[in-house]
Image: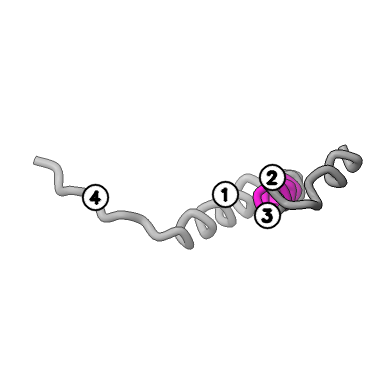
Amino acid sequence: MNEPQKPESKLSILSEFWDFLKVRKKWWLGPIIFVMLAMSLLIVLTEGSAVAPFIYTLF
């Protein structure tokens, strides 16, 4: 039987992504992922605040 897999930490996902970028030479993915994370963080942090209407002018 297979042993139950241990839950991976969040840092292991980042290290796997970093290894993927190094091995496959997909450096162009880095800025895309960074911009997507920054925009999603901006949306989550301004959700339901008075700043929200001004965010729409950026897009």
Residue 35 in view in this figure: yes
Q: Which residues are magenta?
A: 34-45
User: Residue tagged by mark 2?
Assistant: 26
Residue 20 percent location from the top left of the image? 57, 49
Secondary structure category for the residue under label 1? helix
Give residue 53's position: percent from left, percent from top: 83, 43
Mark 3 and mark 1: Cα distance apart in space = 30 Å
Query: Distance from label 4 to label 1 (Cα)?
Result: 22 Å
Q: Nearer the viewer, mark 4 or mark 1?
A: 4
Three-letter code for the amino acid on which mark 1 is drawn = Phe
Residue wearing tag 1: 20
User: The disc labelled 3 sits on which kind of residue?
Assistant: Leu
* Mark 2 to mark 3 CA distance (whole Å): 30 Å
On residue 45, the disc is: 3
Q: Earlier in the sequence, mark 2 or mark 4?
A: 4
Residue extending furthest right? 57
Displayed quadrant of residue 24:
top right
Q: In this rendered view, identify the residue nearer to me: 26 or 49.
A: 49
Real-space CA distance between mark 4 and mark 3, rounded to the nearest whole angstrom: 34 Å
Instruction: Give whichever of discs 4 and 3 has the lower sequence position.
Output: 4
- Structural distance between the alpha carbons of marks 2 and 4: 29 Å
Secondary structure under tag 2 reads: loop
Nearer to us in this view, 17 or 43: 43
